[in-house]
């Protein structure tokens, strides 16, 4: 869809909440039909000046009919319930004092050598130092990588425009998390502040909601798929986590938070899915055994604020946790026992909640170092380099977005290592989905999707990047289809 037609759709979507307020199904059908008609018009080749004139008149007419736009109430409520402004006094990286419990039987930390991350990072950076931005790593497999990606530009690879489907079963309540199942093209789940989780199937057409998981008595703040997709774990503001069977939607187990606090985030240990890490509103991180329903001994630690984001590195030996006071803590994770040992602390920005952390161990074909992607209510998306095996972070670069109060999340593209360039995707409070090339020195913006009528809170790719899902603070989930070349 041409850029101007995307802007027209965005204007329609932002006013969509005013149409038939008691009949949300009509609003969904309306925006789907508008998307279809605008895609058809985009192919007609109307002059650019005529398109811009139509966009201007459309905006004026909708403004006269419905009045000025206002922020949805559910968006404000979610922002206040999850992300709270706070303060802290440190603005540096600091080493925690050695704790005897963190040492193994031979007097060293239970982890691989400290230099492994550092050495890999140095080797990768050495390859890039004298190369222009955007160039690929000259390894023996670089040409094969580009061939797998079609040897097209990054903008062509991520030309998402058309809406494949719109889900509105959680209308008027924020959807803080949307996720495709692991290594799956067509299974999708999303959680809502209405206290439920939806499991959706996109193929065969038409896309459908397979089942709705109910049981939480307050909003669901986060969820995660197990590696085999047979189990989901969810956390809720009702101070419980639940384990669900994805096949039939049955609740297998309900586990209360050890502190009786609101649970705000969760993640599976990537190697051992019997262990799940949760973060709560009393500043604590807990490693939970979902088979026994009990907290792992030595698997708890305290942060400086409410824990809003969690992420493991790929091997599962490093865990990062972010809180609402702007701090990111790294922990060494004992693979044998599940114990956590504090390693490093970074204050991203005093009082700016860290709402999203995504880790990526990049191979040296197309990108430089193991990295962390961070959202932190700074009107920026931040990319950090992981410089050693204790999770020390060094800021690499930032990208402009709108985020000052909402819990916006971002992701790395799953096929990043097979592309020329490296792409990340993020939500934003400007109601758009933004794509950035992290290797492009100037004009890093690759694409921008418009169509939501509220701040975009989360984004998720399916395994082959043919579909992208985004959720917003008004309860709408849009599945975008890649433009066919």
Image: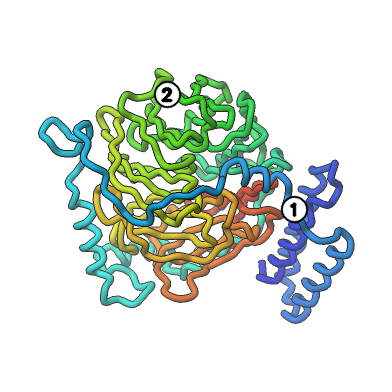
Establish if 56 lies above or below 191.
below
Q: How many marks?
A: 2
Q: Residue furthest right?
A: 65
Q: To which quarter of the image does residue 118 belong?
A: bottom left
Residue at x 49% of width, y 38% of height: 265
x and y, in percent, of residue 254 in the image: 52, 21
Question: Looking at this view, is 214 or 199 the one in front?
Answer: 214
Residue for badge 1: 32
Q: Which residue is mark 2?
A: 290
Residue 158 locus on image (x, y percent) = 52, 63
Name the element at disc 1: helix
Could you say which quadrant of the image residue 126 lies in?
bottom left
Task: Find the distance from the CA under tag 1 to the CA under tag 2.
Answer: 40 Å
Left/right placement of residue 216 relative to residue 57 reads left
**Residue 363 seen anywhere in this rendered image of the structure:** yes
Q: Nearer the viewer, residue 317 or 218?
A: 218
Quadrant where the C terminus is found in the figure: bottom right
**Residue 438 placement, left or right of 54:** left
Mark 1 or 2, nearer chain start: 1
Question: For numbered disc 2, what is the local secondary structure?
Answer: loop
């Amino acid at each position: 869809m041409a850029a101007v037609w995307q802007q027209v759709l965005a204007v329609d979507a932002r006013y969509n909440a005013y149409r038939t307020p008691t009949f949300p199904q009509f609003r969904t059908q309306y925006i789907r039909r508008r998307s279809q008609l605008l895609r058809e018009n985009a192919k007609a080749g109307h002059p650019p000046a005529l398109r811009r004139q139509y966009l201007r008149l459309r905006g004026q007419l909708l403004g006269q009919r419905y009045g000025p736009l206002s922020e949805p109430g559910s968006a404000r409520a979610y922002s206040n319930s999850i992300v709270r402004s706070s303060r802290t006094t440190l603005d540096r990286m600091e080493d925690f004092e050695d704790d005897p419990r963190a040492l193994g039987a031979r007097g060293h930390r239970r982890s691989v050598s400290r230099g492994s991350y550092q050495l890999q990072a140095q080797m990768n950076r050495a390859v890039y130092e004298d190369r222009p931005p955007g160039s690929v790593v000259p390894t023996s497999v670089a040409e094969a990588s580009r061939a797998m990606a079609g040897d097209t530009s990054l903008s062509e690879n991520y030309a998402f425009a058309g809406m494949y489907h719109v889900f509105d079963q959680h209308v008027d309540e924020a959807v803080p998390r949307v996720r495709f199942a692991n290594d799956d093209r067509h299974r999708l789940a999303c959680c809502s502040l209405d206290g439920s989780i939806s499991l959706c199937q996109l193929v065969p057409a038409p896309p459908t909601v397979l089942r709705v998981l109910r049981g939480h008595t307050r909003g669901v703040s986060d969820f995660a798929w197990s590696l085999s997709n047979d189990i989901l774990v969810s956390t809720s503001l009702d101070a419980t986590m639940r384990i669900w069977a994805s096949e039939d939607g049955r609740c297998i187990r309900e586990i209360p938070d050890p502190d009786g606090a609101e649970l705000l985030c969760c993640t599976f240990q990537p190697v051992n899915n019997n262990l799940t890490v949760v973060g709560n509103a009393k500043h604590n991180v807990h490693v939970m055994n979902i088979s026994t329903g009990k907290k792992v001994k030595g698997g708890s630690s305290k942060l400086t604020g409410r824990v809003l984001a969690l992420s493991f590195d790929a091997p599962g030996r490093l865990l990062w946790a972010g809180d609402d006071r702007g701090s990111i803590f790294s922990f060494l994770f004992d693979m044998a026992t599940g114990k956590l040992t504090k390693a490093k602390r970074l204050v991203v920005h005093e009082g700016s909640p860290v709402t999203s952390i995504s880790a990526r161990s990049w191979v040296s074909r197309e990108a430089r170092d193991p990295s962390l992607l961070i959202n932190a209510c700074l009107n920026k998306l931040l990319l950090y380099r992981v410089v050693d095996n204790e999770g020390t972070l060094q800021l690499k670069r930032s990208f402009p977005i709108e985020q000052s109060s909402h819990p916006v999340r971002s992701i790395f593209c799953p096929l990043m290592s097979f592309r020329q360039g490296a792409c990340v995707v993020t939500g934003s409070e400007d109601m758009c989905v933004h794509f950035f090339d992290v290797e492009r020195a100037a004009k890093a913006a690759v694409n921008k999707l418009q169509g939501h009528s509220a701040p975009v809170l989360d984004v998720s790719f399916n395994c082959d990047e043919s579909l992208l899902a985004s959720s917003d603070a008004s309860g709408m989930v849009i599945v975008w289809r890649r433009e066919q070349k």
